[in-house]
Image: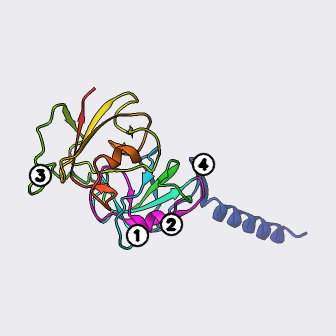
Amino acid sequence: MSVSRKRTMSLKKKLVLSVVAGTMAVGGAVATMATGNAAVAEVVCKGSTVTLSGEAGAPAASSGTFPVGTKLKVTNLDNGKATTVTVNGPSGSCALLNNAAFEQVREPGKNLVRRARIERVSGPDAPAGAASGAPGGAGVQVPPASGEVVCPGSTVTLSGEAGAPAASSGTFPVGTKLKVTNLDNGKATTVTVNGPSGSCALLNNAAFEQVREPGKNLIRRARIERVG
């Protein structure tokens, strides 16, 4: 084989290797390196669980971590399904999916994605800010707080899990007692944290039934108190 032909083949191999090198494994997932103006998704809120808000409309998410307009990609690591949604309002979670978005990633019969990967695809990374937890709605009498008010502005939703009234939390350890009050109807429940989640307080079905409004799977105006 001539010297010139060997040099040509060597150059071709280098070219192939340089293209393959554009893809690399990051944290067990495959990520594509940025080339030119292409953006790389950033994994955020590691360890967060993802649940649904019960709200209708086109696929979207609410977030207590990222502002309106941020695009997030949520992947259910247990079935490989993913959805990319835009944040359209505040919540108490890193990513709280509405019904349409959750349907794109859910496992049958489950209202909670325990093993989720959340990536910020685009948008600002400033804190989303919290809505104020004001007194109750019209005609609703809400007694003053008896414990330490925590996670102001958080929304509260349900995990879809069975069992006696309880909560999971990404803010407080197992054994912490939290009182959750729905400021729109004055109903309250006191529960013990029994595991981790991506929210300040994520109620199981039994606990959520004690404070919910009919047909709603989300408490937008909640007061959360640490009582023990």
Q: Could you tell me how far apart the alpha carbons at marks 3 and 2 are, in whole angstroms?
A: 37 Å
Q: How many marks?
A: 4
Decide which of tag 1 and tag 3 comes sooner along the chain. 1
Secondary element under disc 1, as helix, strand or loop, is loop
Secondary element under disc 3, as helix, strand or loop, is loop
Residue 145, position as x, y percentages in the image = 14, 36
Decide which of tag 2 and tag 4 comes sooner along the chain. 4
Secondary element under disc 4, as helix, strand or loop, is loop
What residue is shown with label 4?
Answer: 28
Range shown magenta:
78-106
Q: Could you tell me how far apart the alpha carbons at marks 1 and 3 are, in whole angstroms?
A: 32 Å
Q: Residue at x 50, y 51 (%)?
A: 116
Q: Residue at x 61, y 55 (%)?
A: 24
Q: Is 81 colored magenta in this rendering?
A: yes
Dot 3 amino acid type: Val
What residue is shown with label 2?
Answer: 104
Residue 176, position as x, y percentages in the image = 34, 29
Dot 1 amino acid type: Pro
Picture quadrant where residue 39 is located: bottom left
What residue is shown with label 1?
Answer: 59
Dot 2 amino acid type: Gln
Dot 4 amino acid type: Gly
